[in-house]
């Protein structure tokens, strides 16, 4: 039996993505906006939409829409639509995406710990240069802001390497081997012990611009580099780039890794591009794998159609 259509707004880069959805949900037709706008009659049949940065107001035009799926773990791109219909929103939580984020975080932490950017620049000029000190992981504390799915997984990836770890979240958490802090009251203590700050916060009104000079000044300066490292793969709206640039120039930051930016793509004229101790990646820390996304959507659609609760629902009041 043909089931209700699923609307996608995914830019396919090849047939593989389409095949992934058709394989995971063989009985559901697909309309992908990237292939053209379906007819009014077709749109009227749509119960599920899988979206990334949907055009504002568009989801409200679908009369029979029942569930909105975010193509990513973050949902700020959906919630910012002022005409968003009051429907359940399911975010993407998945082992494949989590694994990619853990790889990215571990890579960035080690890049800074091991002076890799400096060695890269020496290599380019055929120069054999040792750099001291060479601190070991247990001489530094990595503090993870946003201690949810990704933050906790990143901690589990870093723990075996010997780093001291702490996490900060909205509600209280506990994890063996990790100092857990929460809420406004816990923030200063968390920052004061953090040599390498990793932000995996969602973008909400409460996290807008939180990675600013005031916060950077509260980070530990007692670590082996004398100044902290800032790493952000949450959302660019949480960082104040002019503050980060000023702190780099003033030596208040030892190094920075950014995957997300206030404006994406990062404008060519941004000074961030030109610092040797700033590592820039183009919002690809954890891309959504088509097959994993399709499986996730299929699992949730099948649950929903069997009358079971949807998982990974967004709390609109919290904004994530
Ligand atoms: P999550 O499971 O919802 O975790 C979010 C964490 O942030 C939770 O620990 C939450 O606290 C905490 N938090 C939220 N608001 C807070 C506040 N005001 N103060 C203190 N803590 C706060 O989300 P996730 O799956 O880990 O994803 C996190 C974010 O990563 C996404 O929203 C997205 O922006 C970003 N992301 C980026 C990429 C990329 O490629 N760059 C890929 C995937 C995701 P509680 O635990 O108390 O709720
Ligand atoms: C990517 O940025 C995501 O939210 O999954």
Image: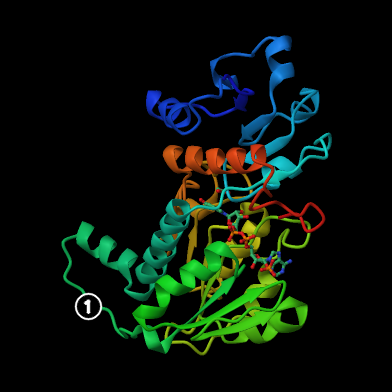
- Relative to 310, is 51 above or below? above
- Relative to 18, is 40 above or below? above
Does the beta carbon of the residue at mark 1 sit less than 8 Å from ligand 1?
no
For disc 1, the neighbor class at 10 Å (few under 14, some 14 to 19, many from 20) is few
Q: Give me the residue at 64% from left, 78% from top.
A: 173
Q: Give the quarter of the image for residue 70.
A: top right
Residue holding disc 1: 130
Q: Give me the residue at 39% from left, 61% from top.
A: 103
Is residue 265 something that shows in the picture? Answer: no
In the shown orientation, is residue 90 left or right of residue 245?
A: right
Considering the image in quadrants, where does the C terminus appear?
Answer: bottom right
Is residue 116 something that shows in the picture? Answer: yes
Q: Give me the residue at 41% from left, 74% from top.
A: 158
In the shown orientation, is residue 281 left or right of residue 246?
A: left
Q: Horizontal and vertical percent for residue 233? A: 53, 58
Front-most of residues 44 and 262? 44
Considering the image in quadrants, where does the N terminus appear?
Answer: top right
Front-most of residues 52 and 231? 52
| SS state under label 1 | loop
Q: Horizontal and vertical percent for residue 72? A: 57, 45
Q: Give me the residue at 50% from left, 82% from top.
A: 165
Q: Give the quarter of the image for residue 168.
A: bottom right
In the shown orientation, is residue 278 left or right of residue 188?
A: left
Front-most of residues 77 and 214? 77
Q: Horizontal and vertical percent for residue 152? A: 53, 70
Q: In which quarter of the image is ligand 1?
A: bottom right
């Amino acid at each position: 039996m043909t089931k209700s259509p699923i609307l996608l707004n995914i830019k396919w880069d090849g047939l593989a993505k389409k095949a992934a959805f058709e394989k995971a949900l063989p009985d559901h037709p697909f309309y992908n906006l990237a292939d053209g706008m379906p007819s009014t009659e077709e749109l009227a049949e749509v119960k599920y939409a899988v979206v990334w940065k949907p055009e504002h107001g568009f989801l409200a035009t679908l009369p029979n829409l029942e569930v909105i799926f975010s193509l990513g773990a973050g949902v700020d791109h959906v919630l910012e639509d002022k005409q968003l219909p009051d429907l359940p929103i399911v975010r993407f939580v998945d082992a494949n995406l989590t694994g990619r984020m853990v790889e990215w975080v571990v890579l960035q932490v080690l890049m800074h710990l091991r002076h890799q950017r400096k060695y890269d620049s020496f290599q380019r000029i055929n120069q054999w240069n040792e750099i001291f000190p060479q601190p070991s992981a247990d001489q530094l504390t990595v503090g993870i802001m946003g201690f949810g799915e990704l933050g906790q997984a990143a901690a589990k990836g870093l723990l075996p390497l010997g780093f001291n770890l702490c996490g900060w979240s909205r509600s209280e958490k506990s994890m063996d081997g990790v100092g857990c802090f929460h809420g406004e009251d816990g923030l200063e203590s968390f920052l004061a012990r953090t040599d390498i700050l990793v932000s995996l916060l969602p973008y909400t009104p409460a996290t807008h611009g939180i990675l600013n000079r005031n916060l950077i000044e509260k980070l530990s300066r007692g670590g082996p580099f004398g100044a902290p490292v800032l790493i952000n793969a949450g959302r660019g709206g949480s960082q104040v780039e002019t503050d980060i640039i000023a702190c780099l120039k003033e030596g208040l930051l030892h190094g920075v890794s950014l995957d997300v930016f206030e404006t994406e793509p990062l404008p060519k004229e941004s000074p961030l591009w030109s610092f040797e101790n700033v590592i820039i990646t183009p919002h690809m820390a954890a891309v959504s794998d088509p097959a994993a996304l399709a499986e996730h959507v299929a699992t949730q659609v099948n649950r929903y159609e069997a009358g079971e609760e949807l998982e990974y629902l967004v709390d609109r009041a919290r904004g994530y």
